[in-house]
Image (spheres, rainbow, N blue to C red):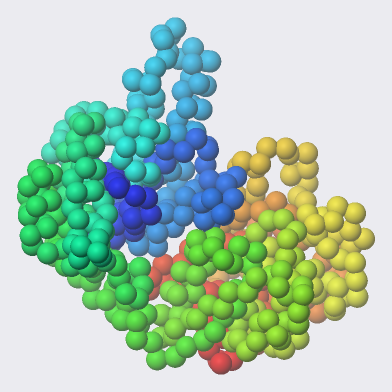
Amino acid sequence: MKYIFVTGGVVSSLGKGLAAASIGTLLEHRGLKVLLQKFDPYLNVDPGTMSPYQHGEVYVLDDGAETDLDLGHYERFANCTLSQTNSLSSGQVFENVIKNERKGKYLGATVQFIPHVTDEIKDRLKQATAENPDTDVIITEIGGTVGDIEGHLFLEALRQFAQEVGRANVCFIHVTLLPLVRAAGEIKTKPTQQSVAKLREIGIQPDIIICRTEHELGEDNRAKIAMFCNVPVPNVVAFRDVEHTIYECPLDLRKDKIDRLVSDVLGVESNTPDLSKWESFVERLIHPEHSVRIAVVGKYIELQDAYKSIYESLTISGAEHNTKVEVVKIDAEHLEKASAEEIIGKVDGILIPGGFGDRGIEGKIIAAQYARENKIPYFGICLGMQIATIEYARNVCGLAEANSTEFNKEAAHPVISLQEEQQGITDMGASMRLGSCESIVFPDTKSFEIYDKADTIHERHRHRYEFNPAYREQFEKAGLVIASVSQKEGLVEIIEVPDHPFFVAAQFHPEFKSKPNSPHPIFSSFVKAALENS
């Protein structure tokens, strides 16, 4: 097994996750099997309880792990399917150490940061290794910035681990900022030098330095960084700002042959990558023949990362249809104060994503009604499915006071209600219906055709409230189509509105299963319907 550790320096948000994902893509195209994972120094056990304002979207894996959005990049850019083993936080580390101490597993020893905490971090690397014996390379991104006090234990654990498995089996990649001081008209390498010096103080010598830059690196700067940071000149790699799409990142890093550099450091033989399919995908993104406008109606609409996987899924599906998807971001609260026609305007499709809390709910219901009545393609995800259900109950079934018990515990018609097994739960973390679930898709429905006539599907969930089965018969009499239910509990998974170009709403999160050149079928069908409506 070979290991790549990706660290960051100078400032956060440099794109370590995209760098790690891009390297994974390039190594896969060289014929290697790759696994990616993220170690985060924060004390939260996982991002599941974090506000989107703090950490963007929560990305959910098949096994129900609630993780950092970078794992979404990993699964989209590479062919690996990740699990909770691939996501580790300081919260998990300390929680496990304290549990072990309470159980007496340390045999009365004084529990210390070294070796007990660092051993816990190394154990996660060993676990990932043991669970994936056919993997060639494990790529681990370390969150935060070198020099942060909370990340020091992770770096110390990596230093120890590299010694244990053999330095020849490890490649350290350090991502730094190369700022341009405009007044001087110069790119400055000193922040990179200082960051690498900090890393070397810990005992880690990077093998490759990736310089995040708005401009070309230049051979003089490359040579200066190589000299002061003790790496070969070719191992100083430029990571330039891409012009159009993040899917250009692997192609940009390929310019400096980072995949070959990594292969050389690790001593692995691999083929020259054939990136023709990836290049074709990027070409369709940059130069599409068509365009559509899709309104995304949400409550965190000003935050790009809050709906990251949804935006990426729309982009990916657009590429399949040679179409640019222009996302029109609509704040749901604004719809409560003005007409839908005035706020939304002329769009080719409307999507309502998942979310929690009652802010903006009535605005989302207005958007769903606008889509249904004006025959605009509609796609509801999780909360978006519940919104469509409430709207249909009020305006078609005649249940004027229909609502979800999440928003009104005393609702006269609780068409969306808390699951029985969720009653009485007080812990917020990892307490929802999470992860992959098998569902039945009924014939003679649009969803059956969308899924290529598959009898069953597996999709990822993250929610507490469900379609209330007590109202199912009433909905169906009013024309609503129940297209899919969960295999085990019979919970409603997909609803459809008949006699509509496209009105599909799903309780699960299909955005977590879209990949370049392999978009999720509902997203693909939705974008196609929007294109036909344009």
Residue drawn at (19%, 49%) of the image = 190
In the image, residue 62 lies at what x, y percent?
51, 52
**In which quadrant of the rendered image does the N terminus lie?**
top left
Towards the viewer: 457 or 312: 312
Q: Quadrant of residue 275?
A: bottom left
Towards the viewer: 451 or 190: 190
* Image side of residue 156 versus residue 193, left or right: right
**Whether residue 130 can be seen here:** no
Q: Quadrant of residue 212?
A: bottom left
In the image, residue 399 lies at what x, y percent?
90, 71
In the image, residue 404 lies at what x, y percent?
80, 59
Residue drawn at (29%, 30%) of the image = 156
* Image side of residue 389 versus residue 525, left or right: right
Residue drawn at (19%, 70%) of the image = 274
Q: Quadrant of residue 185?
A: bottom left
Vertical relation: 346 (above or below) 327: below
In the image, residue 450 lies at what x, y percent?
56, 77
Towards the viewer: 40 or 4: 40
Towards the viewer: 210 or 500: 210
Residue drawn at (50%, 81%) of the image = 326
Vertical relation: 530 (above or below) 184: below
